[in-house]
Amino acid sequence: MKKIIYILFCSAILFISCKKDFINIKPESTVTIDILYKTDKDFQDAVNGCYNVLQNQYQNYWVFGDLPADDIEEDIPNHFDHIAFEQFTVNDRQALLASTWKNYFNLISRANAVLAAIEKTDVAVVKSKDRYIGEAKFLRALAYFDLVRIFGDLPLLTTNVTVEEAYKTGREKADKVYDEIIIRDLLEADAKLPLKYTGVDVGRATRGAAKSLLGKVYLTRKDFIKAEAKLKEVTQSGYALLPAYKDLWNYNLNEHHSEYIFDIEYEEGIGEGSTFTHAFVPAWTTLTDFYGIKGGTPPSDGATTTGLYAAFEPKDVRRSITVLYGITVNGVFTPIPTTSIQASKSYTSKYITPVASNNDSKANWKVIRYADVLLMYAEALNENGKTNEALTNLNMVHTRAELPGYINLSQTDTREKIYLERRLELTLEGQRWFDLVRTGRAYTILQSFGMKPYMTIFPVPLTQIQIINNPAIFAQNPGY
């Protein structure tokens, strides 16, 4: 799975370049679904095309999941788009909003096409039919979950539509999207996906990934009873924390380890590398030479904040991985020079690995890992009045950072410790902003950065508003 081939997949149906691309509209074509989908291999290639969209989309996921929050900042003054997300000046003309909307609905269209075609196939021919259904539903649910947290109300599409239908398709309430697509899809994915894979299939969505994402969905909706039950199932599925936190970020080791649950997969040298190594290192030649990062000047994004550094206890082993201000060679520390305004003055080493060419890193994006699950489980337990059990799961993560475990805390204190632990454990993994929003703390913490109360979601791209041109069925988010 680390070597998914970029597939020119079903272009007449799925790669639609009409300028009226509100959603992926079914084009007029002499090529039919029946012709395109025949064999088990056809459906495997089709599902691979869904994963492929995520490879593209998740290169910028951190701009939504981390940059608007308080731990990552944009140091470079001419990175205007990123500054807009950090300083809450985003408008509906932002290019990243448009590409994000298009990418996710592209994935949804691909998944819908797979599900429509596979329903009538014979399992004797399509031997992995259940697995492909599970994968398509997991990926569609993930796309809708990301979209609903970014944009709020959405078009609810389980089949691809015609041009005429598209103009009449409005935005459904977020609750309906959760109930009728996200949760239903994940429940079915949970029932159909395998527990694990072997060989080249390692990296595909598993039953554990479906359970974990569903647990996060329940937690987001404050359904703590269901969240506890589903996340408990994950804790009984054979996952385990790596003994050393630093090994999560050692790319000489296998990224599909005991803590791995679901990544967006990248691989260097075959045109499928990620941008993360280049994106998150300062544009300082001494540093890039030290780490073996070649291929051009990094954009120097994703600088870590002084507030994040101060939040770590001095003995927390995660601090020296998460927040750095220079390099240490033979015991001698050299700080990043302050002379260039084009270089961030701090960085994280989470995504650093030798890179031979520009934006061709083998570093994956960790969508869900076991530490995230343990902390979500602890949160659900605590909200359900089971604070001692919550502390047990919290301490599994906390003590791995070589810190003493918590004891005899109240429910309120435990809640705050879990929030802090998520902040320190999951920095620059696309979690902080969404955590602040779902727990109702975003405005309190971020109003000094420019956030207004309505800014818990982002504006729908103006292009989409203009295509429908009917605010009665497709209005902009309030405040934008």
Image (cartoon, rainbow, N blue to C red):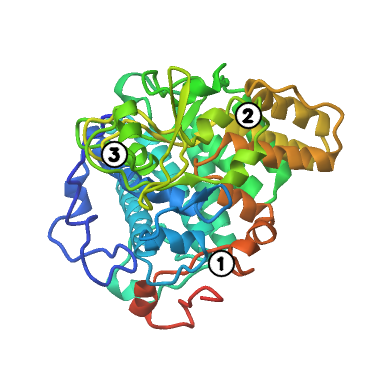
Give the quarter of the figure containing the N terminus: top left
Residue nearest the observer in this picture, 184 or 340: 340
Q: Which residue is mark 2?
A: 233
* C-alpha distance separating marks 1 and 3: 30 Å
Q: Is residue 280 above or below residue 81?
A: above
- Dot 3 amino acid type: Asn
| Horizontal arrangement in the rendering, residue 403 relative to residue 244 (left or right) | right
Decide: marks 2, 1 in contact (CB < 8 A)?
no
Q: What residue is at 66 percent from the left and 29 percent from the top?
A: 314
Secondary-structure class at tag 1: loop
- Dot 1 amino acid type: Lys
| Label 2 packing within 10 angstroms: few (<14), some (14-19), many (20+) | some
The mark found on residue 173 in the picture is: 1
Secondary-structure class at tag 3: helix
| Label 1 packing within 10 angstroms: few (<14), some (14-19), many (20+) | some
The mark found on residue 202 in the picture is: none
* C-alpha distance separating marks 3 and 2: 27 Å
Q: What residue is at 57 percent from the left and 28 percent from the top?
A: 318
Q: Which residue is mark 3?
A: 48
In the rendered image, which quarter is residue 418 located in? top right
